[in-house]
Amino acid sequence: MKYCTHCGAQMHDEAVICIKCGCSVAPQTPAPVKEKDDTMEIVVKVLMILSCIAQGWLLIPLAWCIPMTVSVFHSFRDNKPISTGMKVCVLLFVNLISGILLLCMKDD
């Protein structure tokens, strides 16, 4: 025996509709979860790391390159959207291709 999720009445195991309240009690299948494609995310991360390594001999540009890279990495990890300003700053100060890819990515 199973119970109605709406009114709590006892029902047969095969029942799809509650006799007491008329509500549907059929198990609802969840919508299929679309897997996220991480390819652009990985390319952006690799290019940003390579840019930080390439700019290692320039101390002043590296002082803003590393914090922007870390901020983008944290946004990816926490599934937070990256602001357009940050994307433009990555484009200008870290890596041109990474910035373009970030601007082309969809914010989910």
Image: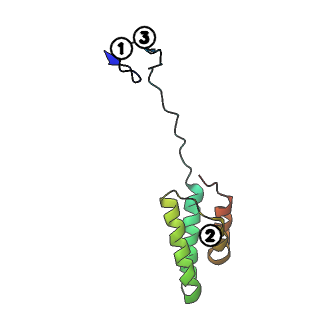
The secondary structure type at the circle numbered 1 is: loop
Quadrant location of the N terminus in the rendered image: top left
Say which of 28 and 36 sits in front: 28
Number of other residues with Cα within 10 Å of mark 1, as a class: few under 14, some 14 to 19, many 20 or more: few
Q: What residue is at 48 percent from the left and 28 percent from the top?
A: 29
Q: What residue is at 53 percent from the left and 44 percent from the top?
A: 35
Say which of 24 and 104 sits in front: 24
Give the amino acid at mark 2: Met
Q: From the viewer's perspective, is the residue at label 2 or at label 3 nearer? A: 3
User: Which residue is under mark 1?
Assistant: 13
User: Which residue is under mark 3?
Assistant: 19
Say which of 66 and 11 sits in front: 11
Q: What residue is at 39 percent from the left and 24 percent from the top?
A: 5
User: Which residue is under mark 2?
Assistant: 86
Give the amino acid at mark 1: Asp
Distance between the Cα atoms at labels 2 and 3? Answer: 57 Å
| Picture coordinates of residue 97, whole percent (x, y) | 67, 68
The answer to whether residue 58 of the structure is visible from this angle is no
